Amino acid sequence: MRLNALFVLFASAAQGLERNDLSARASSVNPLDFSWIKKWAAVEDSFTAGIGSGNTYSSKKDDIACSRYDYSYPSIMNQFFGKSVTHFTYLACSGDASVDIADQIAKLSTGLDLAVMTAGGNDLCLTSIIKTCILQSVTSESSCQKAITEAQSAIDDLLESNIVALLNSLDDKMADKGIIVLSSYAPYFNNQTSECADKEDWVFPGQAGSTSLLLSKAHRTSFNKLVANTNAKLKSAVDKVTKTASSTVVFSDWSAWGEAIGGRFCESGSSPDPEDKSNDNALFYKLPTYKVFNPGTVYRRESEWASDSMLEYSSNITSIQEAEQEQSELDQFMDWISSPLAKRDGPTIGVCGRNAGSGVLPDSIGKIFHPTNLGHESIASYVTWTIGNAIVKREGVTTPACQIVDEITCHSSKGSKGYASTYSLYAHTEEFCKDAVPDMNSKESGTLFSKRYNKNTLDDVVFTVTKDAGASDLDSKTCNAAVNRILDGCDGNNDENPMNWKSGGTYANGPFTYNIAPVRTNRPFPVPKKPSAKCTGVNHYFWHRYNIRGAGWATWDKGQKTLRGNSTRCFGLGLTGWWFEYFDEPDSNDYEWLAKFNSPIATEARCYSNNKVQKWSGGPSDDGCH
């Protein structure tokens, strides 16, 4: 189990690139000692039940009906707490909305030391959005927007009051000094990349067609906003209940973690294949999303992706009966996702006004858009640290020292094909930290600061720093050392990469996690070993007109400081008609941009035919204009 390693990440109370020990006050209370937890419970929905993560929790009918799994975050925590636990009640059930969760809480005995839960998604009919806006092949933009609007209305009108009622009921079940933790949801999508819309089909496999909606940046932004708005209401409910509760009620927010580690859907360089190593950090399950447009194609069982799923591609259905059976299974799937994930043994009435219905499809399908094993490890780490932090505040003690996390992961080691020039990245490290430090120090833990540089160029890149629980203030020296360590430690200057291109990476340093991620993933690959260019010139009597195509140079400035600046350096004033374009993808010769401009007559031989300007600009020295 990796919880111990993950827990250390969030439990770090010190920061810096060198080990920094903090000592606790003299106290009999150790906030990282959980042996006081004797009797505890986990309630709520499928995020807590852990659908698809590990193995079914037990062979009991109720565990199977509720899709409870043994690598859910409560299961991970229960193993972490160890033998001191004498009674663990696990009632979380996939598909349960607030009305059902109230029944779960009513079944709990009193005297609980700890209770954890995640709730709200099924009150909003979020699976209706997944169906209408993502998985269904025959849909419309108006239908998608209607589903989003209905969910937002439920957030505005129902969610907070429902959660307040549940927390108050749970408070009645707690022992003296008991702790209740409500965990957040996390955004599913990177909404900055284009691959999900341009190169992938997210509808149910084989059903993509002209009526399918693309998973556009706008849609992904809307979906992420719903998650953010949901979390805001959950936090507000906790704040409200805290004022009157007898127990300690806290909110655990892990929503920033996906961006920090590149664990969302549609991350730069991620493969359509969920099993590809580029998706090792994925926090949620997904289906394969290859770009395949075969109207009428169906998927049959016995897939390599999951033994009981329906994802194996088949274009040779010869039996009418077999085809009808496959279509029937697909229809069952589309009916099933019309409502929230349901208990398999009966309907669940949701606040959104629909019966959840019963389902017959396997959990290998039902788990999509739910946390992976890594997702549950992450939630467990955040929730466990939140418990310790609650004790720190309640008892007035200082978090004891722990081993500082100091781990770097290069994006290239995960299969990323994105890269940027060394100069363009190092040029922004100091600027990033200058902006990030005051911003991070003004915020609470669980937040992030992100900034984009070289936008709309080949070296387009995003710098991010995330602040975890227990962090003291960040300083510029520490920040600069951390981001430079990513650049120094990844993608060295070697025979395979003599131009020293950088793919970026993630660096976990104490309670801060830094990330440098190039945005463009469709550049020539493997990385170029030398710059290239194709220059043609035409004499127009009083001036010379140039067309220059290039790759491996002028990647960050649209040619302004490199090609244009060095042209002026060579012949002085007189450059006119400047035009520069980065291609959306490399052309047939792997060139990435085109520049057009005029120079005064008689400048070709001394500035361009001899490659002087190109070489000064970082370009080749052996392909002069002709």
Image: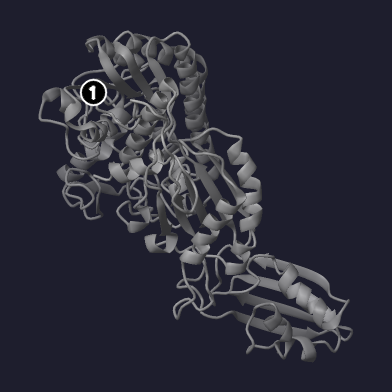
Question: In the rendered view, would you say 389 is above or below 538?
Answer: above
Question: In the rendered view, would you say 586 is above or below 138?
Answer: below
State the image coordinates of residue 610 (x, y, percent, origin top left): 72, 91
Dot 1 amino acid type: Lys
Does residue 146 appear in the picture of this structure?
no
Which residue shows up at 72% across the image and 73% down it?
Answer: 562
State the image coordinates of residue 250 (x, y, percent, origin top left): 42, 22
Q: Which residue is mark 1?
A: 343
Which residue shows up at 45% across the image and 18% down it?
Answer: 238
Which residue shows up at 35% across the image and 43% down it?
Answer: 8
- Label 1 crowd bin: few (<14), some (14–19), many (20+), radius 10 Å: many
Q: Which of 325 and 304 lies nearest the eye of the viewer?
A: 304
Quarter-of-image position of residue 593: bottom right
- Secondary structure category for the residue under label 1: loop
Residue most toward the left? 59
Q: How many marks?
A: 1
Does residue 395 appear in the picture of this structure?
yes
Quarter-of-image position of residue 90: top left
